[in-house]
Amino acid sequence: MKTLAIRLEDELHGRLGMLSKLSGTSVTDTIRVAIEKHLDTLAADPTITAKAEELRAAIEQEAAQQQEALAALLGTASKSAAKTTTTTTRGSRSTKG
C-alpha cells in the first residue's frame, strides 16, 4: 500500500471532513472511494480508451524495435564468437600439426 499526500483548499477540506463524519467513514476511506469512482469514470471514457490503445500500440512498436536491435546485436556477437572460436581452433591445430 502506498501513502499519498495531497493539498486541499480549506473549504474542500472542511467539506471532506464534515461529510466523512456525517457518513460515519474516515476521511481516508472517503478519499479512497472517491478516487476509485473517478478512476472508473475515466476508464469508461472513450477518449481515454482511445489514448490507452494508442499508447499500447506505441509501447509494442518500441518493444519490437528494441527486440530487433538486441537480435542484431546478439546475432553479430554470436558470429564474432564463432569466428574467434574457429580461428583459435585452427590456430591450435596448426600448432599441433
Image: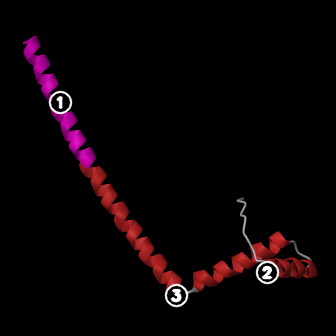
Give the residue pinned by disc 1: 84
What segment is highlighted magenta in the picture? Answer: 73-97
Give the residue pinned by disc 2: 12
Q: Quadrant of residue 36?
A: bottom right
SS under mark 1 = helix
Nearer the viewer's eye, disc 3 or disc 1? 3
Query: Looking at the image, is 81 positioned above or below residue 43?
Result: above
| Depth order, front residue of 7/43 | 7
Q: CA distance from mark 3 to mark 2?
A: 29 Å
Query: Looking at the image, is 90 positioned above or below residue 82?
Result: above
Task: Give amino acid for label 3.
Answer: Pro
State the image coordinates of residue 7 (x, y, percent, origin top left). 73, 70
State the image coordinates of residue 13 (x, y, percent, origin top left). 81, 77
| Depth order, front residue of 5/53 | 5
| Label of residue 46 in the image | 3
Mark 1 surroundings: few (<14), some (14-19) or many (≥20) residues within 10 A = few
Mark 3 surroundings: few (<14), some (14-19) or many (≥20) residues within 10 A = few
Does residue 62 appear left or right of residue 90 in this picture? right
Circle 3/circle 1 CB separation < 8 Å: no
Nearer the viewer's eye, disc 3 or disc 2? 2
Mark 2 surroundings: few (<14), some (14-19) or many (≥20) residues within 10 A = few
